[in-house]
Amino acid sequence: MIISPPILKPNTNQTDDAWIKSTMPVGSPANEYPVLDTLAWHGGYHQLASGNENVARAIADGKVVYARKEFDPVDYDGTKSHKGCVVVEHETEIGNNVSIKYYSIYMHLRQIEAGVDKGRKIFRKSKIGLVGQHQNENKMHFEIVCDQANLAKIIGRSTPELSLGADGRKDVVFGDIHFYLPPSTKFYSDANTTTEVYTSTTPLFVSLNFRSGKAYTQTYRELGNGIFQKQSKDPLLVKYKLSSKDNTESENYEYDLHRFSKRFVTSAISQSAVYELFKFGRILDPANETSNISTIGHWHKVPLPDNKVGYVNLNTTAIKKFSDGDFPHWIGWRLFNDDPTPDSQCNSPLLKKWLDVNGDGKSTQADLKAGLGNADLKDRLSRAICQFPTEWSESLVETQYSWVMKKSDENPNPLTADDFAKFKTYVSALSFWDKVPELPEKNRVWHFHPREFIRQFRKCGWLSWSEVKRIYKNTDDAILKEYIPSFNIMSRKYGFATPLRLCHLLGQGAIESAFMKTMQEAAMSGTETAGKVYGKAVIADSKKREDAFGHWWGFAQSERVAWFGSTKYNSKGGLIASTYNWRAGNLDDPDAQKYRGRGFKQLTGRTNYVNYWVYRGWLDKSTFDDSWWSDAQYKARNKAGMKKRAGEVPNPEVVGIKPFNCMDSGGWYMTFERPTVGKTIDGDIPYLAESATDKKKESDLSRAVTYSINGGYIDWEGRLRETRNAKQILLDGV
């Protein structure tokens, strides 16, 4: 799911959170979500627009389900509001086999783009129209809503708070990692010590955040009424020792995790499993990661109540694990569906307690204005997920708004009957819900604060096959549907699920895997002369998935071809590559064919296969000698005379057969064998280059990424081209 704000402007080197806030400003607390200062429910917020920043754009790929192209403003009490309205249905994926549907609503447009009509497919960043006026101000009412069934899929529950009796969901995992620590959890002076510094008496919640190669911890505890407090003004920077022999601590936790995880590998526990534990706090896919990791300590220093700090082992059965994909209630994601009244006035008991900032039990308009201006309360309310009737149904006007004619603490100036008649005319002119059958039931609509919904799902990084289809245009849908779930699992696991990293990953992969069309290196037939093969045609069997043979292609003598063990030329005599024999840990024939390139990254050579097999726990390191290629007889190309034992992989074909292995082997290679790749990508400019200066930076960076991955510049121009293509789709520039 790729998502962006409804109005876009350049990011001037801001963090994504800061950019979102600056791009989605709110003019007044009175126009905020989810309530107004009259205690009326408000399903969205009012997006300010000025100057050139008045173009409303699609926040995600979707389909237009309603477009009202009536632009004459409606007058109410001397103020004018434009009637233009567009509703977009978004159907996408946020995790493995988790598809969701939600709607974005654009109200008060003074112009709608030609072609933005009901039934029209629309892509993220496409123009919707121009922001008009709402009550004489340049702003747009914007909403994000869903129904009950999709709410359960979006946030993973239908209850106000998360259940703490089990780990969170594994199919939707993104953003920060969170831990529930029950009462009586012990904290220590250091990792792996017995000196206690604190024992909790109430539940605590720890968050682990990865940012710019580093990691940070923060702790929350409940103050009452569903209000939680951070235990440190600033999160704690994670520091660690890369080995038990180190005297100094390092800080680049994310960048170093491939090395740090090696400390805990045993003959029974694979490094892949350890790496996943330290990345997510648990194993997400037990089918692919079968190691028992219960004995490994996942220690972190965390803030504690009373200005204390302490170390805790987060890998225990009592501590439950979650992610931002679970919308944890301790960071504010709470459901409110406890309003007993059918009208548009908020009567949620708990929400009214939140609004009662002075604690006098009243909700006068003055109190409401003061409360809605409180920064802490505004922040808390922004993550409230609320169910109440839509304000855009003409058939509900009488039911919803009769309370505005009654005097109360929160409504000290009720409308007269004449005023209410004018109000009904105004609301009716703007209403549309009853004309759009696709929308949720009008009385039971779930609302999100659009800014927080967008900010949350910008962390997701899970690409739908249709989003990748826009980048890999010529790849069959069936191929993308087969590989994209495993691609997403890989990008999530190895930290490539940011827009910029995804652009480079897809750009590099386009060249390596021919846009996911091939997961093994093909061979050519041709004329062989003195160990050189001049290619004529692709050998059809070399393109078949190797499960068609029941073994790696080349295992049978009849399947061996000269191509891999020879210097290769194309049909025009151009050099393609030298022999793969006695390179990359390969011995003599048939190694070059046996360990040919496979997977998304085209894993190649005996050394890489052996290292990956060890990483996955499929091969015992005791079965071979390290650096067998340093054996003098290896260098002399005398296999029979070698004293060092070469690592042996009997079934290399599994890398190219199973989608998970195809992708995971590529993520492993770029993280463990080429660990500078992610850091190199992070140095790229976060937008598609347009100026000559930026294009030079972008070009140099793409070359550097290509070198980081391949140790050379093989077709770096093509990789740059495809990376730029991905940037057009995945980044926020227009």
Image (cartoon, rainbow, N blue to C red):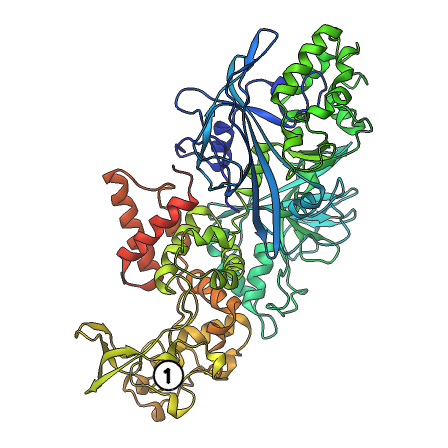
Residue 227 image point, x, y percent? 73, 32
Label 1 sits on a secondary structure element that is helix
In front of the other: 394 or 713:
394
Q: Is residue 258 above or below residue 4?
A: below
Task: Using residue 104 as the reference point, say whether residue 634 is left or right of it.
Answer: left
The residue under label 1 is 591
Horizontal side, residue 546 vs residue 699: left or right? right
Instruction: Give me the residue at 49% from left, 38% from top.
Output: 4
Q: Is residue 605 left or right of residue 422?
A: left
Q: Amino acid at mark 1?
A: Asp
Q: Residue at x 27, y 87 (%)?
A: 636
Residue 84 location (% of width, % of height): 52, 24
Q: Is residue 413 visible?
A: no
> Taking the image as drawn, is residue 642 in sight?
yes
In the depicted structure, whether residue 221 falls above or below residue 594: above
Q: Quadrant of residue 691?
A: top left
Residue 623, percent from left and from top: 50, 83
Query: Is 644 in front, or is 374?
Result: 374
Specify the farthest residue to the left. 573
Residue 325 is left or right of residue 549, and the answer is: right
Q: Is residue 54 above or below residue 151?
A: above
